[in-house]
Amino acid sequence: MNRVLITGARAPVALHLARLFSDSGMEVILADTLTAPLARWSPACARYVQLPKPDVSPDAFADALAALVAETAPTLVVPTCEEVFYVAWAFAQRPINTRLLAPSFDRLAHAHNKAQFAEDALAFGLEPPASWRVNTIQDLEKLKPQSRDLVFKPEWSRFGTSTLIRPSATALEPIVPTPISPWVAQEFVAGEELCAYAVATEGRVAALSIYRPTYRAGMGAGIFLKPVHDEAIAADVGAYVSATCWNGQISFDFCRDTAGRPRVLECNPRTTSGVHFFGKGSSLPGSMLAGAPCPPTVSHPLMIPAAMWVYSLKKAIREGQLKTWWQDYSKARDALSWPGDRLPLHAQPLSLWELARHAWRDGTSLLAASTKDIAWNGAAMSPASATSEREG
C-alpha cells in the first residue's frame, strides 16, 4: 500500500490532510513530539510515532525521522507546521530516500525570514511594504521618529508574536535587537487583510485558496475563515512560486490597501488554515503527489469552534461585538468536522491540556507553547544547513 508520513500531528491542518490522504486510499502515518496530538485520535491515522524534540536535539530528531522513513517507506513526507525546517534539515543531513513535500532548507529560511522575504518579493515583482532590517540599537533609534507609521516584529517569528503595530517610541524601549536576534520594521499598510495557501510543484501552482481571517488566535493563526476570489493575489502567489521554483506548501499574508493593491506582508512556508477549503473528496493529495490541478471545494465560512471560544469571545464582549460574533459563529461550519470521524473533536480538550501543561511549565502563553519545541528562529544547526539545495 502507498503510504504518506505527515509530521506536525498537533495541528488541525495535519488532521485535515490525514483524512484527505486516507480517503484517497493511502495509509497515513503521523508523527510529532507530543504525546496526545489532535490528529492521533483520527481513524485516518494508521500509526502514530512520537519523535524527539528538535529544539533540544536536531540530530536526535533527524536520526529518528530517518529511521522512521527507512522502516515505513512512505511515498511522500508532508511537514505541516514549524517542524518543516528541521525536517528539511534532516533530509539534507541524512540519507533519507523518499520525496519531501518541501523545498530546500535555504529556500525555506529565505521565505521565513521577514526581511529577506520582503527583499525577494520586491525583486519578483510583488509589492511588499517598505522594510528595514533592525540589527542594532542604533538601527532602532533611527526609526523611532517614524514609529507611528511602522510595524515592528522579530525577523524570525510566527503568529504575530511580539509584533508592535504603530507603537510609540517609548513602547520600543524594551526591544534590544542584535545580529543574532534581529528585528524588522515595515511600513504600516491599512486595508483588508487576506491570506493565501498554495501547493506548488517545480514553480507551478497546483492548488490555491484565498481567504479572509475574520477572527484570529490572538494576532496569529486564523480561526474563522471566509473564502475569497482574488485574481491579483493569485497572480502574486504564482509570481513568487515561479521565481523560486517552489516545491511544496506555501502561504502568504496580504493586505489590500486603500488603493486596491495587494501588498504582501509576509510568508509562511508551511501549511495554514487555507487547506481546509479543500474538503472531503478533494483531489488535493493528487496535487501533492503529482502536481495535479485542484481547485478549492468549499465555498462557505469555516471556523475552529474551540478556538473561537478560547481566543475571540472575550475580545468580542470587550469590544461590544458579541452579537456580530454570534452571527458569524452561527453561519460558519466546523473546519474539523468530518463524516465518520468524530473522535478528534472529543479529544480536543486532551490535546489542549497537554499544551496547557507545557505553557504553565515554561511560563509562556498557550499559543507560544503550541510551537515552542518545533520553532526555528534562524539558529545555525550545522555547516551543511547553509549550503544544501536538496529538493524533495
Image: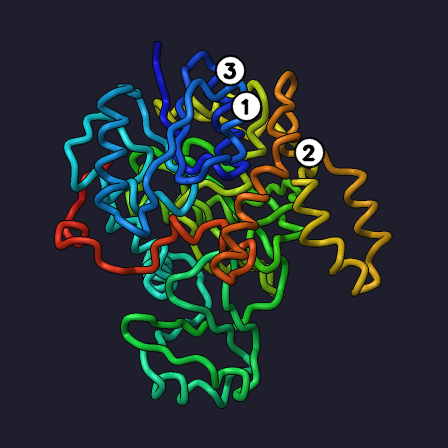
Tell me the amino acid under the disc marked 2. Asp
Q: Position of residue 42 (x, y in %)?
A: 54, 23
The disc label shown at residue 334, or none = 2
Between the residue at mark 1 and the residue at mark 2, the CA separation in whole angstroms equals 16 Å
Q: Of helix, strand and loop, which one carries label 2?
A: strand
Tell me the amino acid under the disc marked 3. Asp
Residue highlighted by disc 3: 23
Q: Is 274 situated left or right of 53 in this image?
A: right
Q: Quadrant of the N terminus?
A: top left
Dot 1 and dot 2 residues touching (CB under 8 Å): no
Residue depicted at x 34% and y 45% = 53
Q: Nearer the viewer, residue 50 or 306?
A: 50
Give the vertical position of 245 relative to 134 (above or below).
above
Give the vertical position of 346 relative to 88 (above or below).
above
Residue highlighted by disc 1: 42
Q: Nearer the viewer, residue 270 or 64?
A: 64
In the rendered structure, which disc, 1 or 2, sits on the residue that comes first in sequence?
A: 1
